[in-house]
Amino acid sequence: MKKIRENMKRYFDKVDDRWRALPLRKQYKYLLYCFLGYLILTIAIILKVWYDTGKANYNLSIEHIENPVVKKKESAIPLQDSMLKIIKNRRDERK
């Protein structure tokens, strides 16, 4: 872990030194391009959300929530042995 941290620190120091070695005018241009890219992405996302909400369907269907535990799902394969059905029914009955 220490080796990874040291390698990352060296890499970031090298990148920082290269950034500082650039003339101020070039740093300003790079910063401006990054900001413009961020601005274009932000505007595109805002327009996309605005478009999606504008064409949304406002018809809400309000229904009761069904409990999935209560819902009985019948097996697709019927039980072949009738004894299993009887035992199962007796076990599930209330006393």
Image (cartoon, rainbow, N blue to C red):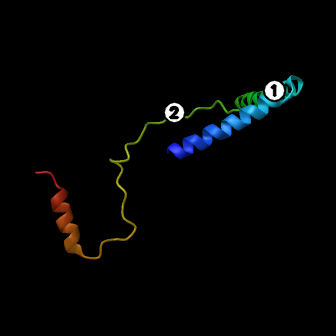
Q: Say what secondary structure mark 2 lies in.
A: loop
Residue linked to disc 1: 31
Q: Residues within 10 Å of mark 1 (few under 14, many from 20)?
A: few
Q: Which amino acid does label 2 sit on?
A: Ile
Q: With respect to residue 90, does 70 lie above or below?
A: above
Q: Quadrant of residue 22?
A: top right
State if disc 1 and disc 2 touch (CB < 8 Å). Answer: no
Residue linked to disc 2: 62
Q: Position of residue 16 (x, y in %)?
A: 72, 32
Residue placed most toward the observer, 72 or 11: 11
Q: With respect to residue 5, does 25 lie above or below?
A: above
Q: Residue at x 51, y 43 (%)?
A: 2
Q: In which quarter of the image is residue 75?
A: bottom left
Q: With respect to residue 61, does 85 lie above or below?
A: below
In the picture, measured across the screen, residue 5 lies left or right of residue 34, that is left
Residue placed most toward the observer, 36 or 81: 36
Residue placed most toward the observer, 44 or 71: 44
Q: Residue at x 20, y 64 (%)?
A: 88
**How far is mark 2 from mark 1, CA to CA?**
50 Å
In the picture, measured across the screen, residue 6 lies left or right of residue 72, that is right
Mark 2 or mark 1: whose residue is earlier in sequence: 1
In the picture, measured across the screen, residue 87 lies left or right of residue 21, that is left
Q: Quadrant of residue 52?
A: top right
Q: Residue at x 17, y 55 (%)?
A: 93
Q: Position of residue 69 (x, y in %)?
A: 33, 48
Q: What residue type is labelled 1?
A: Leu
Q: Position of residue 60 (x, y in %)?
A: 58, 32
